[in-house]
Image: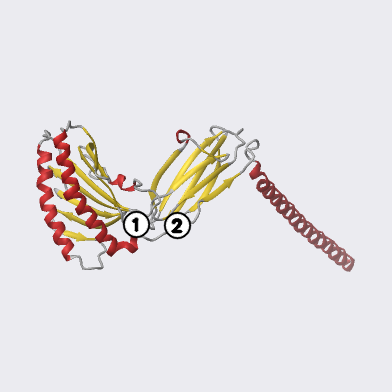
Amino acid sequence: MNNIFVFLCMLSMPTTILTGSHSFCMLTTNIKGQTPFPQFSVTFKLDDITVGHYNSEAGTYIPRENTTNEDMRIFYINNEMKELQPFLDELIKSENQTEGPLVSQLMTMCEVSGNEKAGKLFTTYAIRGSTRDEMNLLNNKLTYQGTRELTKLQLEINKWVLETIIYKRCIRDLKYYLDIRGIQVKKKVKPRVRLIQKANLDSGGFHVSCLATGFYPRHINLTLFRDGQSVADHEITGGDLLPNGDGTYQMRKSLEISAADKHKYTCSATHLSLDNKLDVLLEFDHGEPFKSVIPSVLTVLALMLVFGVAAAIIVWKRRRADSNKSGYSTASTSEESMHKKSEIM
């Protein structure tokens, strides 16, 4: 079965980095065929928080964690969903597939900057798990990438629909949810940043990781520096944004280095919660990979030696005491025997 939530990973994609921007996303899934899922469903997200859900089985918009009166919003969204579903049905009918369910998805996302200036609109359509069309609208300019060859007239029509209908609705919903759910997405939690060094026994070198965790919002710049110069991207592994269980995020970037490497490495993080960038410096002598663990090993050996000597002394004293008691007992027995013999005589 095709991956129904193929675009959810795109919700973690940075929009306008570190400017306090916010986004509103509508992820629509349409299914043709028998599955345990509703034929038509839509998830609404403010930044990374799900604010509501609609599906064809319930037939109505359901706010999530709602603490305000959204009756009018529900009315608007229900009507818009009734307009959208026939459009997606027509798109999916053009596909020739006789076996298994057929899944199509449409994602629409708009942005507003920290000063509430409207930003770009991004739409993408996919079917069978692969992208068919992508459109970006920014500053009255439309950019299109897709499998279809669109004429100039078709592009103008798409631009008019996006600009006049889709964009206005998306920005309207974005500002509405910022008003009623803004506290949830405007919180700021500082990242905890560490630069971790581990010996790589397979290569004889080191594995250096720059880890930032526990931060919110999700946008962060995490950079590894070598002697003050940023490490090239092709040397870096990782960099994926991952959620923590408490609603915060984490990111890790790693680098493999040789045992002979004598450079200085720095992990640098820039985040909305920080007044200045946070730098963590790591300096170590790569010529002796296990030098850092030698003091600990010597301490453990010394303690083992002390305890071993103490145990030996205790055992020796106990054996000596037992031996003295045994000797005293033997002497006493001999004296009693001699005394009895003298009495008999």
Look at the image and tell me in which quarter the N terminus lies: top left
Residue at the image position 20 percent from the left and 37 percent from the top: 128
Image coordinates for residue 157, horizontal then vertical, percent: 14, 41
Q: Are marks 2 and 1 in contact (CB under 8 Å)?
A: no
Query: Callout 2: 10 Å neighbours few (<14), some, many (20+)?
Result: some
Between residue 226 and residue 305, name the one nearer to us: 226
Q: Which residue lies under the disc numbered 1?
A: 115
Residue at the image position 13 percent from the left and 54 percent from the top: 80
Q: Earlier in the sequence, mark 2 or mark 1?
A: 1
Between label 2 and label 1, give the one nearer the viewer.
1
* Image position of 314 with respect to 145: above or below: below
- Could one spot residue 37 in this view of the protein? no
Q: Is residue 306 left or right of residue 220?
A: right
Between residue 237 and residue 232, name the one nearer to us: 232
- Could one spot residue 254 in this view of the protein? yes
Look at the image and tell me in which quarter the C terminus lies: bottom right
Q: Which residue lies under the disc numbered 2?
A: 273
Query: Callout 1: 10 Å neighbours few (<14), some, many (20+)?
Result: few
For label 1, the SS is loop
Image coordinates for residue 213, horizontal then vertical, percent: 45, 52
Q: Measure the alpha-carbon separation of dots 2 and 1.
A: 17 Å
For label 2, the SS is loop
Q: Is residue 275 left or right of residue 61?
A: right
Of the residues shown, which amino acid type is indicated by label 2? Ser
Q: Is residue 93 left or right of residue 214?
A: left
Of the residues shown, which amino acid type is indicated by label 1? Asn
Image coordinates for residue 35, horizontal then vertical, percent: 16, 45
Image coordinates for residue 311, horizontal then vertical, percent: 72, 54
